[in-house]
Image: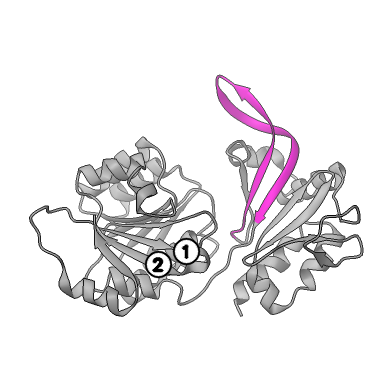
Amino acid sequence: MNCKKKSNIIEVCNYLNQAVSDVLLSLTDAESEKLSEIRIKAELPVILIFTDSKQFITKTGRMTEIYSDNLLCLSRDELDRCFCRMCEYSVHSHSQSIAKGFISLKNGCRVGVYGTAVIHDGKVQTIRDIHGMNIRISGEFDDCAEEIFNMCFVDGVKNTIICGPPSSGKTTILKGLCRILSDSCQKKLAVIDERYEMSSSYLGYFTDVLSDYPKQIGIEIAVRTLSPDIIIFDELGNANEVNCVTDALNSGVKFITSIHCKNENELIMKKQYQILKEINAIECCAFIDRNYKLSKILRVNNNENSGTDNTRNKLCYERSIHCIQI
């Protein structure tokens, strides 16, 4: 049983109304393990997203896959109260993250928030009239990153991208790699935790965590002041972030990050990947399916004249993981 996920569910109940909390607290260990999202909307049914099903909640507190008029809905006032509790009754102090569409809870769970955008000078300043929220239940598995570590890093740290669809466990994998690289390998790590999703977990003795920093600023500060061996951050995004990564590489620092994509065809269409590949900055891409399962390792061939790494290909074949060079 993933005790971290169970405790996160209990913590999330503190922000929800009694009817939803009662159902969540009644989940079996197996059901809690599979719960990934709680979706709440004003005047619409509450939905629980499990890894193998989608469930409504009836007004009598039972789960069902069948839509009907007998389903539990939150009023707008109830939704607003949940939102205020998640903001610790200080919406203003969370205004920057709300404008970006999320709230980070103390336990590392991220809540997607949407409603009516307030625009100023072409930018979202805040959100009013909250329409709904999507609570993502984070988990933690002590051995979740061991397979990727053994496949990608056993012969040295490589510039690596963890690839997978939303809610596949990319952030959890990054946290697991932090613990291995810090405590087992004694590498100095700098983690740029822009959305407070990683710093709620133990990340290792040799790990410095920069919370709430925009990634490009955090990367610059880490390189200049913390002398890291590796910089780790979630969701490589815009061109400014990519440029900061290239600057860090020129300073002798390795990086590990993540990108939303299902396969290599989607990956090579990403502008971030194209820029880093162009300067031979990427050495390894690890693809994961839902539930942290490693499905494919891509060794990026930065030397067009190099031969195939037969040892690595043999290892991948023995572990039933497709390993190719791109």
Q: Amino acid at mark 1?
A: Asp
Residue shown at 22%/76% (left/top)? 314
Quarter in which the C terminus is drawn: bottom left
Residue shown at 77%/67% (left/top)? 24
Q: Amino acid at mark 2?
A: Ser
Task: Assess whether mark 2 and mark 1 are in contact (beta carbons under 8 angstroms).
Answer: yes
- 133 in magenta: yes
- 301 in magenta: no
Q: Which residues are magenta?
A: 108-135
Quarter in which the N terminus is drawn: bottom right
Q: What percent of the width, then of the height, locates residue 248?
A: 26, 47
Whether residue 103 is visible, yes or no, is yes
Q: What percent of the width, then of the height, locates residue 197?
A: 54, 56
In the rendered image, the residue lying farthest to the left is: 305
Residue shown at 47%/64% (left/top)? 289
Q: CA distance from mark 1 to mark 2?
A: 6 Å
Query: Of label 1 and label 2, which has the lower sequence position?
Result: 1
Residue shown at 72%/49% (left/top)? 88
Q: What percent of the width, then of the height, locates residue 320?
A: 34, 75
Depth check: 19 or 13 in front?
19
Mark number for residue 311?
A: none
- For disc 2, the marked residue is 295
Crowdedness near tag 1: few (<14), some (14–19) or many (≥20) residues, C-alpha within 10 Å: some
Depth check: 136 or 305 in front?
305
Relative to 232, 122 lies left or right: right
- For disc 1, the marked residue is 289
